[in-house]
Image (cartoon, helix red, strand yellow):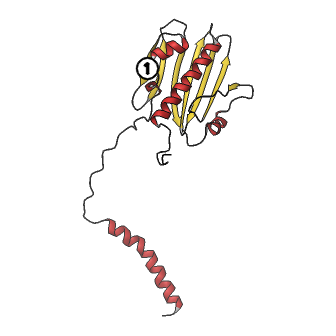
Amino acid sequence: MPRTHLRRAALVTASLLPTLALAACGGDEKVGAKPDLPSETPALWNPCDALDTAFVKAQFGIDATEHAGTPTKPECRFTPAEGSGDAVITSNYLLFPGTLDQAWKTMGQGADADVRTPSVEQADDARVVVNATKEQLYVTGFVQNGDLIQQVDVVDPAPYDEKRVVRGVVATLTTLSTHAAETGAGADPSASPG
């Protein structure tokens, strides 16, 4: 067979293969039912697993009510009695495959922001941002354990005790980091131990 006929035969065969493959998928055979899949992905983690009202009272000096969200939408929030003028504390998390430093660069903090880097036991990294205004104190902390980055936010109306709130946020980050390390949250499941 001349080369042109071989090329033509190869092209015809190559163009028919996808059609034949699709035809093999069809037929009168019935396909099984689709499996039931959860409508919402369950949460990996809820910071309220490590925090409670006694911890909030000890660290921030406030009587608060705990709100843990739902299993699929965890939001750990501690709210004071209405009209008390006490702080509100929230904690949440995100899974991020990079470092806290990489995530930090996407947050767009101003050059004049009061950013602190506390030492937090068992954490890969941590940051605390303090924004004190005449009316309110805003303190946000981040702690990284592997792919898990947890966040703590405190909003405290004036009069506030900045040093106590910052200490409380660092203590909260430490508690969250310890709990994450103990439970393996944020750890790479494919990594071999030791």
Q: Residue 55, how many percent across, how many down? A: 49, 17
Above/below status of 12 relative to 3 = above
Q: Nearer the viewer, residue 18 or 153?
A: 153
Q: Residue at x 59, y 36 (%)?
A: 124
Q: Amino acid at mark 1?
A: His
Q: Residue 132, how many percent across, how many down? A: 67, 16
Crowd rating for badge 1 (residues with CA inside 10 Å; few <14, some 14–19, many 20+)? some
For the image, the number of numbered tags is 1
Q: Nearer the viewer, residue 189 or 30?
A: 189
Above/below status of 130 relative to 24 = above
Q: Residue at x 48, y 8 (%)?
A: 82
Q: Residue at x 54, y 40 (%)?
A: 147
Q: Residue at x 48, y 46 (%)?
A: 193
Residue designated by label 1: 67
Question: Element at badge 1?
Answer: strand
Above/below status of 84 relative to 187 = above
Farthest right residue in view: 112
Q: Determine the image quadrant of residue 40.
A: top left
In the picture, measured across the screen, residue 68 lies left or right of residue 108, that is: left
Q: Determine the image quadrant of residue 107.
A: top right
Q: Residue 76, how many percent across, how many down? A: 47, 23
Farthest bottom residue in view: 1
In the picture, measured across the screen, residue 78 lies left or right of residue 42, that is: right
